[in-house]
Image: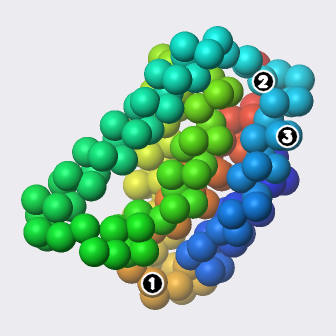
Amino acid sequence: MLLLCWVAYEDFKFRAVSWWIFPLILSAAMYYPASIHVAWHQFLMNLGLVLLMTLMLMLYVYIKLGTLKHFFAQMIGAADIFLWVVLTPLLPVMLFVMLYTVSLLFALAAHGLLKRFTFYGEKSSVPLAGLQAIFFAIMISVPV
């Protein structure tokens, strides 16, 4: 949970997240007592979904803008995709899809609310990895 909070801190402050944090999150999550260890086929299906979502987003940006130049620098951060990939081996497919979708809705609502405050900054980018990390930290801390 602390590692997810660190992702949020870095993403809010710098709009970037250190790459080394993601292997640590994955390592910690694999040893988290309540984590759900999924079968290889579910992990591969989740990974396929992340790949499909990334490719669909790239296609949308290409159709809309006519180029993929600076896709990972301006459209979506690598940290966003790294966070999705780190979550793939931890959840069954249906739970992954459900929590991924709800985390995006949470990020949309939180960004809409937070951009009204001066501490959030004037940046037009959305700290998606940070907002999703907060969501998943909340989900981890809620007792089942």
- Label number found at residue 35: 2
Q: Position of residue 91 (x, y in %)?
A: 62, 23
Quadrant housing residue 58: bottom left
Quadrant housing residue 13: bottom right
Q: Point out the frontmost of discs 2 and 1.
A: 2
Q: Give whichever of discs 3 and 2 has the lower sequence position.
A: 3
Of 4 and 59, the residue lying toward us:
59
Assess disc 3: are there few (<14), some (14-19) or many (≥20) residues with their C-alpha within 10 Å of its C-alpha: some
Q: In the image, is residue 85 above or below residue 88? A: below
Look at 34% across and 37% down and name the residue there: 52
Identify the element where label 1 is drawn.
loop
Q: Position of residue 116 (x, y in %)?
A: 45, 76
Q: In the image, is residue 97 above or below residue 40? A: below
Q: Can the viewer see residue 92?
A: no
Give the left or right position of residue 141, taking residue 87 as reference: right
Query: Which residue, given by chain and number where applicable, does mark 3 sit on?
Result: 28
Assess disc 2: are there few (<14), some (14-19) or many (≥20) residues with their C-alpha within 10 Å of its C-alpha: some
Quadrant housing residue 26: top right
- Label number found at residue 123: 1
> Looking at the picture, which amino acid does disc 1 mark?
Lys
Number of numbered callouts drawn: 3
- Tell whether label 1 touches label 2 (CB within 8 Å): no
Q: Residues under labels 3 and 2: Cα distance?
A: 10 Å
- Quarter containing the C terminus: top right
Identify the element where label 3 is drawn.
helix
Give the left or right position of residue 101, taking residue 8 as reference: left
Look at 65% across and 28% down and name the residue there: 89
